[in-house]
Amino acid sequence: MKNAIKGGEFLIKSTDPNDVFIPENWSEEERMIAQMCDDFIHTEVIPVVERMDKMEDGLMPSLLEKAGELGMLGMSVPEELGGMGVDFKTSLLATERLAMGFSFSVAYGAHTGIGTLPLLYYGNEAQKQKYIPKLASGEWKAAYCLTEPGSGSDANGAKTRAKLSEDGKYYVLNGQKMWITNGGFANFFTVFAKIDDDDTLSAFLVEADSEGISLNPEEKKMGIKGSSTRQVFFNNVKVPVENLLSERKNGFKIALNILNIGRIKLAAGVMGASKQAMTTGIQYANEREQFGRAISKYGAIRYKIAEQAIRTYMVEAATYRAGQNIDDAIHALMDAGLSKAEATLKGIEQFAPECAILKVAGSEALDYVVDEALQIHGGMGYSAESSIERSYRDSRINRIFEGTNEINRLLTVDMILKRAMKGELDLMGPAMKVASELMSIPETPEVPEGTLGAEFQALEGFKKAVLMVAGSAVQKLMQTMAKEQEVLMNISDMAIQIYLAESGLLRVQQLINQKGEEAAKVQIAMVKTFVYDAADKINKYGKDALHSFAEGDELRMMMMGMKRFTKTEHFNPKEARQLIAQTLIDANQYCF
């Protein structure tokens, strides 16, 4: 890609539509991988979903083994270690397609993501040679032991301890972990613990048949019932010193970096689940008749179908845009001399703010989609006989997984501001420019040419709005900023809307460039509707933040600025949504 953009830079820089990857451009090989995943879900997983939810003994491990035989567990693993070695965005595509398998997708995601990647990216050669081929083939299943009863969001507050034996040959591990996905059948744990009185975690590779490991019974959960979730106890477990992962006290960094990957992978997964739930809802709306017509003919139902599609399409645009940005960063870092593992970690870390944004946006889009898909089903949706009831229950965990959405909102702003403080991002320069613009007489800028000219212009206004609010908040609140969670959440919500709007605009503009306006008319309707709605949301978030810390003339001036920066052109959202819904209803499925 010609113009590499850094993580968080979307707030201050424009991106050329031709510099982003869009899902319409998947290669033939990538489409074949997607098809392989689709076929696996429909032939191996969907027929046994009921059995899976009843936790039939041995069923989930056997499904993982079958996936391993097809190469699906080794997507991110290099070929020399028994994997397929695909690029990062293709691993996201596989995650998206396999997410249509309900609880299976949780087991798959935990095994291939947080279960395998700490070792793949931080392990030494001997550790990787010993364990990775077994994990890539599915012979061994992996789990990740971080959370404890007293430490959830505060991961570094863990109490599990490791002590070096007197002969220096092994660490003795004592402690308790909870909510461990795949815990009931994993052969291999990555366990986070503090050595002696360290203030920071270290990470250990622990074989599940080690003496001293015991498990609580399976947790009874609201959703993802087929996913094994256990508490794991470590009682004087001996871990060979050669199974310390990376260096002492590097565990917290490992946990954070692996969670960054987990967040964008979750965004890809919820997108697949959204498409599946939407298709289920559309098909039901076409079949179900009330008052002598299919309910898909009614405006209230069409609104829901269109809005589901809009939100999913924008999350998809943003997820694969970030995926390609990460791939580009990885290649640039490898060209600069870093190993593949180091470059991958650093490339993903660069886009940590976007990963946090995508986790929030994706999980909340899915919650909207499944809620409205269930509503379209009416009473049938509430029946345990419908698949949408399972989708609804399974969806809810995603706002908690991989760091709660509240933590991720706070992290988004925190990471971007820290980069600004370090001089890695010039946020204050553009923010000062916006502040001086407030003092001048507003000019009426010319709307750029093109079908989406007004929307691209609106996007520039949205960026000015968030820079005005964030810049003013930093100056006003200074040392107390970290405690002002409501203000941080407002700023984060503005940034989320901006990232989705820009990603959608870039995707649709590239589509127009490739195929012309007529071929992209439904996508144009989707992105125009999203930007139209985003203007009001950004205005509200901005006003709420400003009222929290500004007053007097300064507040009045910034409120005028907020109004100016979130102005949109006349637009008919009903007409746009009718076009979007009709396209989906005619296709009888999600079709973009």
Image (spheres, rainbow, N blue to C red):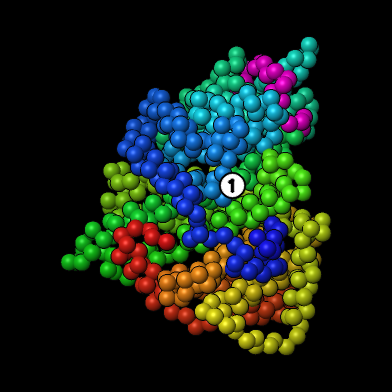
Spot occupied by residue 443 in the image (x, y as percentages of width and height): 68, 88
State the residue in front, 552 or 569: 569
Q: In which quarter of the image is residue 293?
A: bottom left
Is residue 576 covered in magenta?
no
Above or below residue 383? Residue 229 is: above
Q: Is residue 435 left or right of residue 511?
A: right
Residue occupying image coordinates x 75% and y 67%? 471
Q: In this view, does 173 lie above or below 322?
A: above
**Mark 1: few, some, or many residues within 10 Å (few <14, many ≥20)?**
some
Front position in the image: 221 or 431: 431
From which residue to which does the magenta span run? 231-249
The image quadrant where one finds the N terminus is bottom right
Relative placement, left or right, of 236 versus 376 is right
Could you tell me which secondary element the residue under label 1 belongs to?
loop
Q: Residue at x 59, y 68 (%)?
A: 17
- Main secondary structure along the magenta-highlighted residues: strand
x, y percent for residue 583: 35, 67
Residue 235 is covered by the magenta coloring: yes
User: In the rendering, at what x and y percent does residue 251 appear?
Assistant: 71, 34
Q: Quadrant of the C terminus?
A: bottom left
Q: Is residue 371 above or below residue 136?
A: below
Q: Mark 1 points at which residue?
A: 87
Query: Which residue lies most toward the top here?
Result: 167
Q: Residue at x 17, y 66 (%)?
A: 292
Q: Can residue 157 be seen in this view?
A: no
The answer to whether one can see residue 158 in this image is yes
